[in-house]
Amino acid sequence: SKLYAEAGDNFFMLDTAKHAHLHETSAPEDVAKAYYDVLRQIQDALQICPRAVILVDELETLHPGVAAALIPVLKGNPVAGVSTKEAIYILTSDFGKEGASRGMSFDNIKSEIYRFSAKIYNDLTVANYVTILP
């Protein structure tokens, strides 16, 4: 994970870009390797600071099998014995890029995010953690 010195020892950005090349036809062992890499990055960050702020940028670029690593973390399950409950997780996506949600009501935006998540992830738990910021 990348540590931003200006934010102190409690802000981490997961390096998900290195897994952006994975797609639906990727070998299962490559997806599994990336899945465990994401978990390791989270574990490493939480060992340094249990109350870390962890940023997962461009969530939609992650292979669903890799993004699945976030589900137990968001549910508060420990990662290799390290608690995940005290950390703050920020997940971003380009969902609203280029005004895709302009003029939509809050309920319509939330519905679109849910559908967007359903296309990418089999487990819709991620969609249940969505907070829309202005």
Image (cartoon, rainbow, N blue to C red):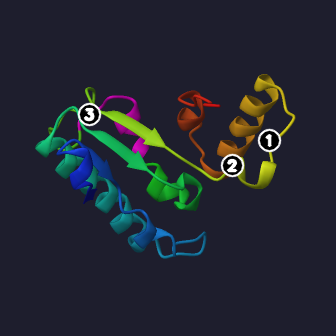
Distance from disc 3 to disc 1, alpha carbons, whole Å, reads: 32 Å
Task: Kindly give the residue lying farthest to the right in the view shown.
Answer: 103
- The reply to whether the magenta stretch includes residue 75 is yes
Which element type, helix, strand or loop, lies under badge 3? loop
In space, the residues marked 3 and 2 are separated at their CA atoms by 26 Å
Residue 69 seen: no
Counting from the top left corner in percent of width and height, residue 80 is at 17, 44
Say whether marks 1 and 2 touch (CB < 8 Å).
yes
**In the rendered image, which residue does mark 2 sit on?**
95
Give the structural element (helix, strand or loop) at label 1: loop
Q: Which residue ends up furthest to the front in the rendered image?
A: 6
- Local crowd at mark 2 within 10 Å, few (<14), some, or many (≥20)? some
Residue 101, which numbered label? Answer: 1
**Pointer 3 residue:** 84
The location of residue 32, given as percent across then percent down, is 38, 64
Amino acid type at circle 3 is Thr
Q: Quadrant of residue 50?
A: top left
Q: Measure the alpha-carbon separation of dots 1 and 2.
A: 8 Å
Span of residues in magenta? 70-78
Are the two marked residues, 3 and 2, in contact with CB atoms closer than 8 angstroms? Answer: no
Callout 1: 10 Å neighbours few (<14), some, many (20+)? some
SS at badge 2:
loop
**Which callout, 1 or 2, points at the residue further toward the start of the chain?**
2
